[in-house]
Image (tube, rainbow, N blue to C red):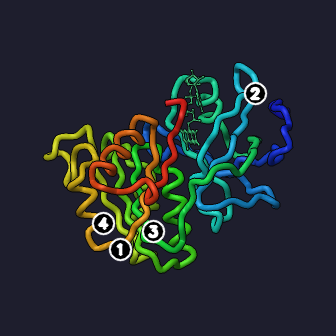
Amino acid sequence: MLPTRRNDGGPPMQSAEVITSWKPTPSTHAIRLRKPESFRFRATQFTFLGLPTSEGPAWRPMSLATSPTREHLEYAVRVSTSAFKQAFSELRPGDSAWVRGPFGEFFLNEQRPAVLIAGGIGITPLKGMAEFAADRGLGIPVRLLYSSRSEAEIAYRDELETLARQNPRFRIQLTVTGMASGAWDGETGRISSRMVKALVADLENPMYYVCGTPQFVEDQLGLLARMGVSEADLDWEGFRGY
Ligand SMILES: Cc1cc2nc3c(=O)[nH]c(=O)nc-3n(C[C@H](O)[C@H](O)[C@H](O)COP(=O)(O)OP(=O)(O)OC[C@H]3O[C@@H](n4cnc5c(N)ncnc54)[C@H](O)[C@@H]3O)c2cc1C
């Protein structure tokens, strides 16, 4: 059963089998798909993901959540009551999904120190970048500033900490916005210029990558502009639809 979508001459729709389906946090869901043989992408572009849903075939733009150096494709979403998200959450090993892509210009510059700024599920492509830098042994420093609602909602925490052990040039700074400081032994509150400065103080000519909801992206672009970061030194992906 193939979801219909007009073929406009771009990348073809390819069917891909679900390998794993799990919940990284209480409000998110993730899947791994068998990578179609001819599928190539950069760390980390997006694809359209097609699923049969209770309301018929549906497609959403979805960032790839893993590096091209890894065996499978991966996606993660914030769950909602939409038919698409319900269908996504119900995927089980052996089911089929459809992938069309890759698309976009949001990928890692392998030559420049990287500052990754993630809000919530916006971690997906940034995790792929961090994996890519670790797997390829890139010589650049990679710093991640990752804001989540609560400790329980920090998606991929174990994977990110494993990457930090694998790659001595990768450093993580977490902050949580919805917990009292006594309940969490780390940074609290929204991303601030103080947090960014502390993370980048020793970096020369870094490139900034921002990803999250459109509101999150707008807030971070405003913050970085006020800090004097020029537009040429930043790249962003806004998850339209939130
Ligand atoms: C490049 C890109 C990468 C993305 N990557 C991720 C990801 O990794 N994880 C993730 O959870 N989400 C991602 N998103 C957002 C995702 O495509 C969905 O829009 C979002 O998850 C909401 O889906 P829903 O089914 O819950 O919303 P719905 O309840 O179906 O939609 C809410 C409202 O938004 C509208 N809408 C839905 N999607 C879009 C859209 N893409 N553009 C404009 N309007 C829209 C609907 O028509 C509806 O009015 C990405 C978006 C973009 C553009």
Disc 4 target residue? 200
Left or right: where 168 falls relative to 96? left
Disc 1 target residue? 204
Disc 2 target residue? 57
Name the mark on residue 163: 3
Amino acid, disc 4? Val
Residue that lies at the very extreme toward the top in this rendered image: 55
Is the Cβ of the residue at disc 1 closer than 8 Å to that at disc 2?
Answer: no
Q: Which element carries disc 2, helix, strand or loop?
A: strand
Q: Report how far apart the C-alphas of labels 2 and 3 lie in the structure.
A: 36 Å
Amino acid, disc 2? Pro
- First of labels 1, 2 by sequence position: 2
What residue do we see at 32% from left, 40% from top? 149
- First of labels 2, 4 by sequence position: 2
67, above or below 13, in the image: below
- First of labels 2, 3 by sequence position: 2
Q: Report how far apart the C-alphas of labels 1 and 3 lie in the structure.
A: 22 Å
Q: Report how far apart the C-alphas of labels 1 and 2 lie in the structure.
A: 47 Å
Q: Which element carries disc 4, helix, strand or loop?
A: helix
Left or right: where 225 falls relative to 109? left
- First of labels 1, 3 by sequence position: 3
Which one is in front, 219 or 205? 205
Left or right: where 153 falls relative to 226? right
Q: Report how far apart the C-alphas of labels 1 and 4 lie in the structure.
A: 8 Å
Q: Nearer the viewer, mark 1 or mark 4?
A: 1
